[in-house]
Image (tube, rainbow, N blue to C red):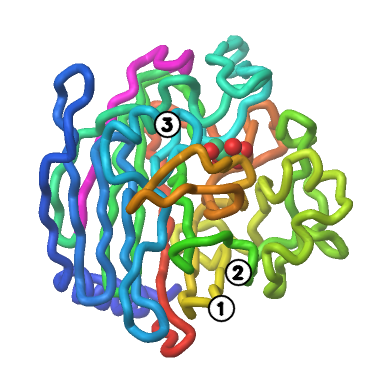
């Protein structure tokens, strides 16, 4: 992109950010007595709530096609519920390594590392005490909040002290998430946000129409570990290159869908994974008219259709979250990359800074901004 265009884009973003109000309030205390804080970012279009526990998105209020604002993410009203739920990762920043690492083992610089097995026989989302369970420090920024976490050398078995910053900024209809990280020893990382969206506000997500900008995906084994193949989506239920209703093919007789109980797969995004986020996915909800567009600098996106939600979690306003009542579009590097040298690398070395950006853009089918 030309410098003039970039300058214009950043000027537009700054103007939009200036309209965002940021406030904070106590959200409860951890068993250790440590305080958890809730931040509210609001502007005329959206209201976003975040908490320091897991640097989570707990709520997004977005307008529907009639202009009425409503909840579009799954989450809880109390800290106790977040503490009790070790399964869903609602709204959290997951790390140090989001998604799975086969058998909780990888080799780096000739040394083998072992991680907790919390999704037998594999490690999921960084181990038993991943970044979703940490109480991040926070500071307000114009139009947003920066969360910081220092993960010590050996944390959950990973090498190196890793310092991570995650900044959420609200600008117009867009929630921007910027990640950066540095380390003092060679390590691996894969950071993503685990928000579950329900653009209707309730019910299942099967009627939503989805587009994913991916010609290939990474098929998995029975433990949801990639086989290493980058398989074409063409001619399969994984082809979302043009819009398809999520429920249309989710239960079809396809081995990959059977293994995962529905969609729970990493898609290999087309196009450059560079400094400028490009479109990864778009979801249109016919009930509300809401449209979610996801842009990222990451090479992949995990589309998870909430297959493992089982109605045992009671969230916002007492709502029970049953199977497939929320979907995640987790922008990320590919699962189990440390064991797949052919995948884009997830290694970070001292002296390097990891950067990654994702934007969730909300619009409606009445007026499409941007
Ligand atoms: C994974 C699912 C897992 C879920 C946990 C997703 O990122 O792909 O397999 O069940 O996280 O809530």
Task: Tell me the residue that label 3 is attached to.
Answer: 85
Q: CA distance from mark 3 to mark 2?
A: 27 Å
Q: Which residues are magenta?
A: 144-159
Q: Which mark is residue 286?
A: 1
Q: Which mark is residue 205?
A: none
Q: At which x and y percent is residue 191?
A: 45, 39
Task: Tell me the residue that label 2 is attached to.
Answer: 208
Q: Residue furthest bottom?
A: 366
Q: Is residue 83 above or below residue 10?
A: above
Tally of numbered discs: 3
Q: Is residue 150 above or below residue 292?
A: above
Q: Do tag 1 and tag 3 residues touch (Cβ < 8 Å)?
A: no
Q: Is residue 322 above or below residue 209?
A: above
Q: At which x and y percent is residue 207?
A: 63, 69
Q: Earlier in the sequence, mark 1 or mark 3?
A: 3
Q: Label 1: state its secondary structure.
A: loop
Q: Residue at x 79, y 39 (%)?
A: 259
Q: CA distance from mark 1 to mark 3?
A: 31 Å
Q: Nearer the viewer, residue 170 or 58?
A: 58
Q: Residue at x 35, y 42 (%)?
A: 180
The quadrant holding residue 174 is bottom left
Is 156 in the magenta?
Answer: yes
Q: Nearer the viewer, residue 220 or 109?
A: 220
Q: CA distance from mark 2 to mark 1?
A: 7 Å
Q: Residue at x 27, y 75 (%)?
A: 45
Within 10 Å of disc 1 (Cα), the crowding (few <14, some 14-19, many 20+) is some
Q: At which x and y percent is residue 12?
A: 26, 77
Q: Label 3: state its secondary structure.
A: loop
Task: Confirm whether residue 300 shows in the render.
Answer: no
Q: Do tag 2 and tag 1 residues touch (Cβ < 8 Å)?
A: yes
Q: Earlier in the sequence, mark 3 or mark 2?
A: 3
């Amino acid at each position: 992109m030309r410098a003039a265009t970039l300058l214009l884009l950043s000027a537009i973003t700054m103007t939009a950010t200036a309209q965002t109000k940021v406030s904070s309030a106590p959200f409860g205390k951890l068993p250790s007595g440590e305080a958890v804080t809730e931040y509210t970012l609001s502007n005329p279009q959206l209201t976003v709530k975040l908490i320091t526990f897991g640097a989570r998105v707990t709520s997004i209020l977005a307008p529907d096609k009639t202009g009425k604002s409503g909840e579009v993410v799954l989450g809880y009203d109390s800290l106790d519920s977040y503490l009790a739920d070790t399964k869903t990762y609602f709204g959290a920043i997951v790390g140090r390594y989001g998604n799975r690492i086969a058998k909780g083992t990888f080799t780096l610089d000739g040394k083998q590392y072992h991680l907790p097995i919390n999704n037998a026989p594999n490690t999921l989302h960084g181990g038993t005490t991943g970044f979703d369970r940490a109480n991040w420090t926070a500071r307000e920024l114009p139009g947003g909040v920066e969360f910081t976490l220092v993960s010590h050398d050996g944390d959950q078995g990973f090498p190196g002290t890793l310092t991570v910053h995650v900044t959420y900024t609200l600008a117009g209809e867009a929630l921007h998430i910027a990640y950066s990280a540095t380390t003092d020893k060679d390590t691996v990382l894969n950071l993503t946000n685990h928000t579950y969206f329900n653009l209707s506000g309730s019910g299942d997500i099967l009627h939503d129409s989805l587009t994913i900008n991916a010609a290939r995906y990474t098929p998995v084994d029975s433990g949801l570990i990639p086989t290493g193949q980058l398989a074409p989506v063409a001619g399969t239920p994984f082809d979302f290159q043009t819009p398809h209703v999520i429920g249309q093919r989710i239960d079809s007789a396809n081995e990959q869908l059977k293994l995962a109980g529905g969609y729970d797969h990493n898609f290999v995004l087309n196009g450059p994974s560079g400094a400028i986020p490009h479109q990864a996915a778009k979801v249109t909800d016919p009930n509300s008219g809401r449209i979610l567009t996801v842009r990222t600098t990451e090479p992949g996106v995990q589309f998870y259709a909430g297959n493992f939600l089982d109605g045992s979690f009671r969230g916002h306003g007492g709502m029970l979250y049953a199977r497939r009542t929320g979907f995640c579009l987790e922008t990320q590097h590919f699962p189990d990359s440390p064991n797949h040298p052919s995948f884009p690398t997830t290694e970070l070395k001292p002296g390097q800074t990891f950067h990654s950006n994702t934007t969730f853009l909300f619009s409606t089918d009445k007026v499409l901004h941007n």
